Image (spheres, rainbow, N blue to C red):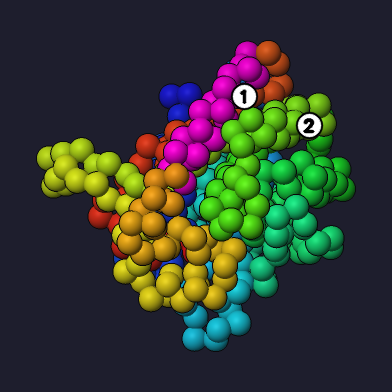
Amino acid sequence: MHFWTCVCSLQLLVVTVLGNELQEDYPPISFSCPPLPPLARPARNVYELRPQDIKVVMAMGDSITAGFGIMGAQDDPVLDLYEYRGKSFSIGGDAGANTIASWLRNYNKDLVGMSVGSHVGELCYGAVCPPNQYYPDEDVLNAAQGGAMIPNLVKHEFKYLLSQLIENPAIDMENDWKLLTILIGANDLCLGCSGEVPFLSADDFERHLTELLEEIQKNIPKVFVNYILLFNVSQVRIRHLPLLNVASKLLQVYDVSIQSQYCKDVHRVLGIECLCAFQPGKEGIKVREELGRITREYNDRAVKVIDNFAFKYDDFAVVAQPCISQGTAAGLTPAVLST
């Protein structure tokens, strides 16, 4: 099985943001895959890459990757504003966390870069990401910022990531293979539907992603970029799935989220948290359908950009992961949704 297929399969299990209820219902994943044989030699190029070749994990993105609200509603309301980076789906390193990083650690005990613990949220708003927000001891190589949009990745997150790679004595920048997971675009959608700024056009999304990948390729040797396509925030059509006892119907992520008082309270208080998508009635349906259309445009452009990088480099590759873009909301409870 190709390395990127393994990563995609794991994401189907862990990409959701875990709340208290879900953590209790679904204990840590039992890792029962047999150990791989020792490497005769390290991978000579990105096409030979195997899980045990990965020495460094990195992540870029928004509040989902930062782990905002993973623990759900807390008795202490201050903790509702915390990011639980040690449980982040792509890079969390807390004991028992179901993450891509914890999966890779089964193959390489010396894995570097995992974020740990929790702290108060780090926030961007539009083009502004205040300086000195990072907590390097906890964030490590998790560069995600709550509220981040795709322009923030080059202007802000990439700079932090590169500086930490260079300064970390445990990392051999030239020789260590690195996995970088990127999930971005939700705030570009939400800020646009709020009416405060126009929607970021598909052309601009394509331009910013191209610039980001070019910077990564030029400045970070030996890196596999795991780009996760956006899920459709408006609606998910579910076909008849007899084995899962799921009938054909149309299910919106919105329909799941409004079952949760916690979600409704958060979206009422924090306008940046996509309040516009929670409008009731016909107007709300119209807004969510527009969000779905733009989501598909962003994903199509991301695939186009990524295809332009295919098979051009020996030490760099980027793959578009379709996992959550093709998923459904069938059978989900509000506990699995990010705020």
Relative horizontal placement of residue 114, taking residue 164 as reference (left or right): left
In the image, is residue 293 part of the stretch drawn in magenta? yes
Q: Please tell me whether residue 63 is drawn above or below residue 297 in the rendered image.
A: below
Relative horizontal placement of residue 186, taking residue 174 as reference (left or right): left
> Taking the image as drawn, is residue 169 in sight?
no
Amino acid at the residue labelled 2 = Glu
Q: Residue furthest front?
A: 283
Q: Where does the N terminus fall, quadrant-wise?
A: top left
Circle nearer the N terminus (2, 1)? 2
Q: Residue furthest bottom?
A: 76
Return the mark for residue 109: none
Density class for disc 2 (Cα within 10 Å; few <14, some 14-19, many ≥20) is few
Return the mark for residue 305: 1
- Residue 183's quadrant in the figure? top right
Query: Which percent across, then down, holds residue 71?
Result: 49, 70
Along the line of sight, the residue nearer the viewer: 277 or 55: 277
Q: Nearer the viewer, mark 2 or mark 1?
A: 1
Q: Which secondary structure lies at badge 2?
A: helix
Along the line of sight, the residue nearer the viewer: 251 or 221: 251
Magenta stretch secondary structure, dominant: helix
What is the CA distance from the residue labelled 2 to the residue labelled 1?
A: 14 Å
Confirm or deny contact between disc 2 and disc 1 (CB under 8 A): no
In the image, is residue 100 part of the stretch drawn in magenta? no
